[in-house]
């Protein structure tokens, strides 16, 4: 039921809890993506796919949320079709096209036709949002690839220079910049560029926050079978066996090597894949990151809301001891959190008991992230802190997770073993089991 004046206060219950939960956890991404610059490598196949209109809407949404978008646009499939139609041979050598003078007008026409298709789809825009403006131009100065292994690549080019200022002017003017895979030389020639090289060079030139390559499902699935996050070295290993799109994976991994913080490979076929990748922790594609996105660190004031959201249901059901926001804030330095992209999705506390004893407490991980070893990492972090503080005996009082701790080197012990002050507070009502580990 839509909210209306006739039905005042349409019930908030109609919005599912999962939406509220998702929206809250998307907050760090909404903040992070605002004013961030993304270079998106879009192969010609993506523009021809039935999902393209959805993708164009998602790009409009991203732009309306404040991201600055540069679309680097290829047209290989359309070029193949155009050349076949007129019977011109422009073969691929080592995945790179040999662009003859006869083929070039068709390459230019096919590339321009894809650009027009992008402009058409992006103009259709987003319901209720202002029409998206696009700016395209001669942003790239190119040079010939030249002769490699005895093959003359003729009018196939490499990026020599990117007109960063012109692209930035378009972005700061509120437009989405379209960079076609055509480069121009000072001598008046037009060169056909590879999508990967063009996108990587543009990303480097503008200092992009992300480079995103859109791939077909057939290419993406095998990459996602074993992992969804890789460091650049592993990405290069995968690129060695991935032959698609003249090495798009290799190109974006090179961009990360060159200093771009993150690269993403995302399906252009799956509806909403780009939004899932950019606004959820688990994403929907392959992330190549310079730094592992999951980290354990000591808690800070910004984590208090997340920790409370995590522990409140467990306190209500009696799994964890009640702890007020004030107490949590006062003892915040005792907490470690598991951070994914700025959101605390797990926590563990280390409370000093006396000079040689401490207590691990409040170990919790968001249900959807359990079973991935995250609590184990939090426990190890706190144990290392305890060792550094010369703690000899580490206690845990638990009602529900005794076996979890026993499997990690703890053993049951009588409550009388607790240091006197803690023993005095032992709850005879909850009757937690007491476990200890000697460090
Ligand atoms: C206990 C808890 C922190 C584990 O988090 P996690 O990130 O899933 O833990 P890990 O991934 O490191 O370990 C997962 C393993 O522990 C097991 N496990 C999870 N909860 C368990 C429990 N209560 N008792 C025994 N084993 C448990 C899982 O089955 C899994 O076993 P497997 O590897 O053989 O499949 C999480 O379940 C939680 O938040 N529970 C509610 C709060 C709680 O009970 N805290 C402990 C009291 S301080």
Image: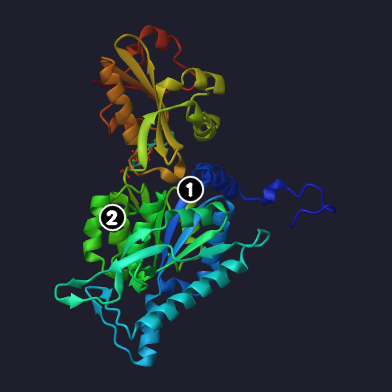
Q: Which mark is residue 45?
A: none
**Residue 232 position within the rendered picture, expressed as x and y whole percent measured from the top left:** 27, 51
199 above or below 433? below
Figure quadrant of residue 224: bottom left
Chain-order first, disc 2 or disc 1: 1
Q: Label 2 vs label 1: CA separation? A: 20 Å
Residue in view at x 45 percent, y 46 percent:
368
In the rendered view of the protein, which quadrant contains the C terminus?
top left
298 above or below 29? above
The residue closer to the viewer here, 341 or 337, is 341
Question: Can I make out residue 403 in this image?
Answer: no
| Residue position for label 1 | 36
Residue in view at x 34 percent, y 54 percent:
228
**Residue 269 position within the rendered picture, expressed as x and y whole percent measured from the top left:** 45, 69
260 above or below 331? below
Figure quadrant of residue 45: bottom left
| Residue position for label 2 | 254
The way the protein has been coloured in the rendering is rainbow
Tell me the element at label 1.
loop
């Amino acid at each position: 039921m839509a909210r209306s004046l006739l039905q005042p206060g349409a019930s908030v219950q109609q919005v599912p809890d999962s939406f509220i939960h998702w929206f809250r956890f998307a907050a760090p991404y909404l903040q992070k993506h605002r004013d961030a610059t993304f270079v998106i490598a879009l192969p010609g196949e993506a523009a021809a796919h039935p999902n393209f209109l959805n993708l164009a809407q998602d790009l409009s949404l991203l732009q309306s949320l404040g991201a600055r978008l540069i679309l680097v646009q290829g047209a290989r499939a359309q070029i193949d079709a155009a050349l076949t139609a007129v019977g011109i041979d422009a073969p691929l050598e080592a995945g790179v096209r040999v662009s003859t003078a006869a083929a070039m007008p068709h390459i230019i026409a096919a590339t321009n036709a894809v650009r027009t298709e992008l402009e058409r789809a992006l103009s259709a825009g987003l319901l209720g949002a202002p029409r998206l403006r696009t700016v395209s131009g001669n942003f790239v100065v190119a040079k010939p690839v030249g002769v490699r292994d005895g093959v003359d690549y003729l009018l196939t080019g490499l990026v020599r220079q990117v007109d960063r200022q012109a692209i930035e002017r378009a972005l700061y003017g509120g437009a989405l910049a379209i960079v076609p895979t055509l480069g121009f030389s000072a001598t008046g020639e037009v060169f056909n560029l590879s999508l990967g090289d063009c996108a990587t060079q543009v990303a480097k030139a503008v200092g992009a926050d992300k480079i995103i390559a859109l791939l077909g499902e057939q290419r993406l699935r095998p990459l996602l079978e074993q992992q969804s996050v890789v460091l650049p070295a592993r990405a290069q290993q995968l690129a060695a066996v991935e032959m698609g799109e003249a090495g798009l994976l290799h190109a974006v991994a090179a961009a990360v090597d060159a200093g771009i913080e993150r690269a993403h490979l995302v399906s252009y076929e799956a509806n909403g894949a780009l939004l899932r990748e950019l606004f959820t922790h688990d994403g929907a594609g392959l992330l190549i990151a310079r730094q592992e996105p999951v980290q354990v660190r000591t808690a800070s004031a910004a984590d208090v809301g997340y920790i409370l959201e995590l522990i409140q249901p467990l306190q209500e059901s009696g799994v964890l001891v009640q702890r007020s926001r004030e107490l949590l804030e006062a003892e915040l330095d005792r907490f470690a959190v598991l951070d994914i992209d700025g959101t605390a999705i797990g926590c563990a506390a280390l409370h000093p008991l006396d000079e040689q004893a401490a207590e691990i407490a409040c170990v919790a991980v968001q249900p959807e992230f359990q079973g991935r070893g995250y609590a184990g990492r939090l426990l190890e972090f706190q144990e290392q802190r305890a060792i550094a503080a010369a703690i000899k005996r580490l206690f845990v009082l638990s009602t529900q997770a005794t076996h979890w701790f026993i499997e990690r080197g703890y053993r049951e012990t009588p409550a009388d073993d607790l240091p006197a002050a803690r023993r005095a507070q032992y709850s005879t009502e909850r009757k937690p089991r007491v476990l200890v580990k000697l460090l």
